[in-house]
Amino acid sequence: MTRTIQSVIDTILQSIPGAPLADTVDTFKSGDPAQPVTGIVTTFLASYAVIQRAAELGANLIITHEPTFYNHLDETDWIKDDPVYQAKRALLDAHGIVVWRFHDHWHMHQPDGIMSGVVRAMGWEAYLPDATMPLFTLPETTVGALAAELKAKLGVAMLRVVGDLAMPCRRVGLMVGAAGGTWQIGFLGGQSMDVLVTGEIHEWETCEYVRDAIAQGRKLALIVVGHANSEEPGMAYLVEWLRERVPGVPVTHVPVGDPFTFI
Ligand SMILES: [Zn+2]
């Protein structure tokens, strides 16, 4: 049986309670979903290099967590004359590659698909008392040791810490991605935790809240691991999840990697 790309997406959405959402960024960004699927690539973000790799693999469906065209809604009017955008669009068109975003629905999966992948990568399954709340009770460690563990297990070249590396910690909140200062600070203020681990921050929001909290004598630290670093394991886990649902279709995870060079 020839399976179309649209039928792959339909199969995915059937596994998500509440799907499909009426208002969502999880839409097709390129290509014709009526074509037969030749292979699937999962990634945190469909970068130019990830698209090239998908073409090499003969995959015509890229499932990306984050946007393709540099803004949340993948609006392209504002960038339509830009040469970088045009070259990316031309590469997708040349290979007939469909990009579909799997952001809102993967987070809606029960449990959250991204969190599942990250928790597995960290080996923290046993330390999560409440599956609906990303708050872990770890064996006692220090902020420095926790940072080292995150670097090793997430394969991160560099992360940033606000706080005292020697501070003992057990209660660790994990807010992957870039939830924004209001959510991050709300989580910090609403729960009792020693450390918040997050993906991406606005430096003038969550970072400054933690700096003030520490100056007030509160026992708190913030670890910023980077947006791609914090969510890529969730798109790696998607490979395994998909193989059960679309047997016979080649599925490969192509990590986008951290864009930064640290000097
Ligand atoms: Zn996310």
Image (cartoon, rainbow, N blue to C red):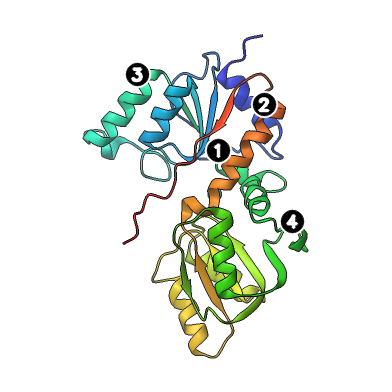
Q: Are marks 2 and 4 in contact (CB under 8 Å)?
A: no
User: Is 138 on the left-hand or right-hand side of 215?
Assistant: right
- Residue 254 in view (yes/no): yes
Q: For residue 127, which quarter of the picture?
A: bottom right
Separation of disc 3 and disc 1 at Cα?
23 Å
Q: For residue 168, which quarter of the picture?
A: bottom right
Residue type at tag 3: Ala
The residue carrying mark 1 is 102
Query: Is 150 above or below relative to 192?
Result: above
* Numbered circles on residues, count: 4
x, y percent for residue 84: 26, 36
Q: Nearer the viewer, mark 2 or mark 4?
A: 4
Looking at the image, which residue is at 52% across and 53% down?
155
User: Is 64 on the left-hand or right-hand side of 111?
Assistant: left
Separation of disc 1 and disc 4 at Cα?
24 Å
Q: Nearer the viewer, mark 1 or mark 4?
A: 4
Q: Are marks 4 and 3 in contact (CB under 8 Å)?
A: no
Query: Is 125 above or below relative to 241?
Result: below
The residue carrying mark 2 is 11
Looking at the image, which residue is at 55% across and 42% down?
103
Q: Nearer the viewer, residue 110 or 244?
A: 244
Q: Residues within 10 Å of mark 2 (few under 14, many from 20)?
A: some
Label 1 beta carbon less than 8 Å to ligand 1: no
